[in-house]
Amino acid sequence: MRLLRVFQERFGFTRTELVIIMMLTTSLLIGTTIRHLRMTPAVQSILPSPSVDSQFVRGARAFHDALRQPHKTAPETNAVSSGDPLDLNRAGETDLIRLPGIGPALARRILSFRNDHGRFARVEDLCRIRGIGPRTLERIRPFVRVHPQRRQK
């Protein structure tokens, strides 16, 4: 207790601040001691080697890494090529999901719009769908087309 009074008088700490400083110092000493003990050969023989890694830990690490990576709506290998544009009036949900920036929800909205309003007359009609603006349209424009409606004989 005398040491606490000396610190209070010399540095102007309150009692609460001194308790916090002592707790942090104690934690630092305990952590340093544990780290030092883990380095000793006697303790290392008891602990599992770093090369022994359970499937659970590897799975947890893979899951954690997957969460930290940015979400992609479609794999790059499944993307539609600009050499073979997709017909908006014939495309299904899986075809639409392959377009850059189009996920499952937006693909369903496109199909719903097509069912409610009929065939697309031009690619720009996509802007009438909630979630597709000028930037998204410009991103997918090279990959889509609209064939004129064939007249029945």
Image (spheres, grey):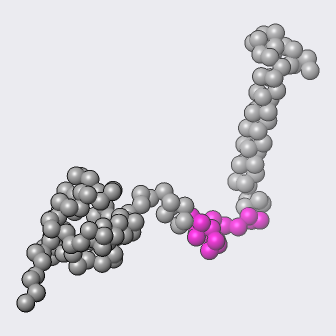
Q: In which quarter of the image is the N terminus?
A: top right
Quadrant of res 110: bottom left
Over which residues does the magenta segment extend? 45-61
Furthest residue to the top? 9
Q: Which residue is drawn at 9% across and 83% down?
A: 151
Quadrant of res 12: top right
Between 39 and 85, the residue placed more toward the observer is 85
Furthest residue to the right? 1
Q: Where is residue 32 in the image (x, y as percent from the top left)?
A: 72, 43
Between 125 and 53, the residue placed more toward the observer is 125
| Residue 47 appears left or right of 113 | right
Furthest residue to the bottom? 153
Q: In which quarter of the image is the C terminus?
A: bottom left
Q: Does the image show residue 88?
A: no
Furthest residue to the front? 153
- Was residue 127 drawn as part of the magenta stretch in this picture? no
Location of residue 78 with respect to 40 vertically, above or below: below
Location of residue 93 with respect to 136 vertically, above or below: below
Quadrant of res 80: bottom left
Q: Residue at x 50, y 60 (%)?
A: 67
Q: Does the image show residue 152?
A: yes
Q: Which residue is drawn at 72% across and 54% down?
A: 38
Location of residue 15 with respect to 68 vertically, above or below: above
Q: Where is residue 99 in the image (x, y as percent from the top left)?
A: 27, 68
